[in-house]
Amino acid sequence: MLVRGSGSYIVTALLGTIGVAIGFVGALGGVITLIAALASKREANHRRAVAWIFLMAGGCLIAVLAMEIGLLSNDFSMQYVASNSTRSTPMIYKIATLWGALEGSLLLWAFVLSGYVTAVTISFRRQIQDRLVAWALLTILAVCVFFFGLLVGPADPFGTLPVAPLDGEGLNPLLRNHPLMAIHPVMLYLGYVGFTIPFGFAVAALVTGRLGEGWLVSTRIWTLIAWVSLTIGILLGAWWSYEVLGWGGYWAWDPVENASFLPWLTGTAFIHSVLVQERRGMLRVWNLSLLLTTFALTIFGTFLTRSGVIDSVHEFSASSLGPLLLGFFGLILVVSVALVAWRGDELRSPGSIDSPLSREGAFLANNLLFTLFAFIVLLGTVFPLIVEAINDDQLAVGRPYFDRMLLPIGVALLLVMGIAPVLTWRSTAGQTLGTRALVPAAVGAAVMVLALMLGAQGLGPVLGIGLGGFVIGSSVRHLLLAVLRNGWAGITGRAGGGMVAHIGVALLAFGFIASTSFSEEGEFQLRPGDRGSVAGHEVTFVEI
């Protein structure tokens, strides 16, 4: 569509529409070609599938560039630009407006997914005829077809207005109050969308019957990329919230926060339990189920945040896409359960856990706790929806429920996190456990004493701080031994990275305990110019 603006003709909407159409055709063509390739086993069909994938990625890139051109050039003939940007919007927020509303965020999803598929295709270019890789790409492309289908249909980001307004409406004020708007959503999407890749390989393993440990090696790096990205995205979101709300307002158990946290919980459980399968060939059903569930939760989270069915401070783009997203989520669940049931007998592990006092026993305990944690979060998130659907009553599940239910699980997770590194595989003798845990326990005790000296009060908070110290002591001990054995490779290896992550979790636990247990609150009725005092800080009410 040609629109006159600033003495020139702008074709961004038409260009974007063409780009989305190319992306959809590329994804659909890739699916059809891969089905033909798997049926015929002809090498030419596999090569054609790669071409379709590159076409899809190219089309999506064109669409994203068209949207950014429209935003940066103030092309208010485009409905998305007119609804979400203004002439005075700073450039960083104009760029970030791409993911500031429903249609643009789905375009970002498709763009990130296209990038992942392209990277996987290049990475496995010499194994493209392998049935496992072909089925994985077919599964991932099927997901691409769904999201591109939304973009060419009900969530078209390139709709135009018959008359372009002089200025736009602008983003929601809550989305243009911090520079993290440019980073936080992108990192979340890199994590959310990234779990599509291990999901594709999990489905491929079930379809092809290659249920050993080989498919895990293929997905390891992609799972870690997705998990790290999602972790960074959640932490940046907490930072953003703290910057805006202040004084501990970094996490409120809001439904949208929970939607991003749920796949993180199950993904974290998988990252731990997969070590048991790689080492001892155990937990095959469990690991596949965790991966399938993690991807399903990303779609369910998208349904929660984009359907308007929940009340949330993060609800910026409700839409009518709820039934489609919920239907896709249901399809994923049905297919996943059917595949696992079909391969049930072949998924039986050759071994079993010899002793609960073993590394694999600790990993199993870790997984059970993470799964219980996720279930409680999911229940608290969807329970209001269930109640409203049954009797049309509106119910809110607030912070007291989550804090009361999850605190014991968090403490247990810290304990397991500290014990696991001092355990051996298969079985750990009591004397060995006592010797190895001595230094970490001493560190935990020292941290407790330090906390008491600094004024900490209450048995629960002090014990929690002590457990955090125990985790740090255990992790540092493991790192030092790894360095003595393998040099700096002991830190940069997989186990070393895990220990560094454990130290980070312990530090986060310190912050959480301090902000929730040792905080002080004050309420004042102030007029402009009045002052109030709380916890040694003086607050002046300047103006509204």
Image: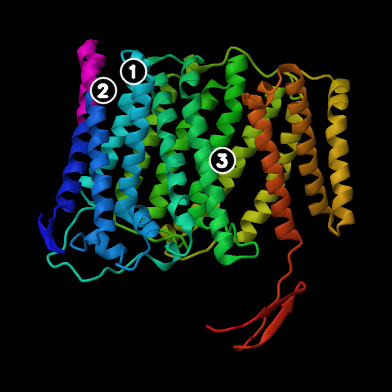
Do the residues bearing badges 2 and 3 touch, measured as CB atoms within 8 Å?
A: no
Do the residues bearing badges 2 and 1 touch, measured as CB atoms within 8 Å?
A: yes
Residue placed under numbered mark 2 in the picture = 50
State the image coordinates of residue 513 (x, y, percent, origin top left): 73, 54
Residue placed under numbered mark 1 in the picture = 125
First-in-chain label (2 vs 3) = 2
The stretch of residues the image draws in magenta is: 28-50
Quadrant where the image shows the N terminus: bottom left
First-in-chain label (2 vs 1) = 2
Quarter of the image for residue 38 reads top left
> How far is the residue under mark 2 from the one under mark 3?
34 Å
181 shown above or below 342: below
First-in-chain label (3 vs 1) = 1
Q: Is residue 311 magenta?
A: no
Residue placed under numbered mark 3 in the picture = 265
Q: Secondary structure at mark 1?
A: helix
Amino acid found under the numbered disc labelled 2: Val
> How far is the residue under mark 3 from the one under mark 1?
32 Å
State the image coordinates of residue 225 (x, y, percent, origin top left): 49, 33
Alpha-carbon neighbours of circle 2 within 10 Å: few (<14), some, or many (≥20)?
Answer: many
For image coordinates 80% across by 38% down, the residue present is: 470
132 shown above or below 4: above
For image coordinates 64% across by 85% down, the residue present is: 525
> How far is the residue under mark 2 from the one under mark 1?
9 Å
Amino acid found under the numbered disc labelled 1: Arg
Q: Is residue 197 left or right of residue 264?
A: left
504 shown above or below 138: below
For image coordinates 66% across by 87% down, the residue present is: 530
Q: Is residue 282 visible?
A: no
Amino acid found under the numbered disc labelled 3: Leu
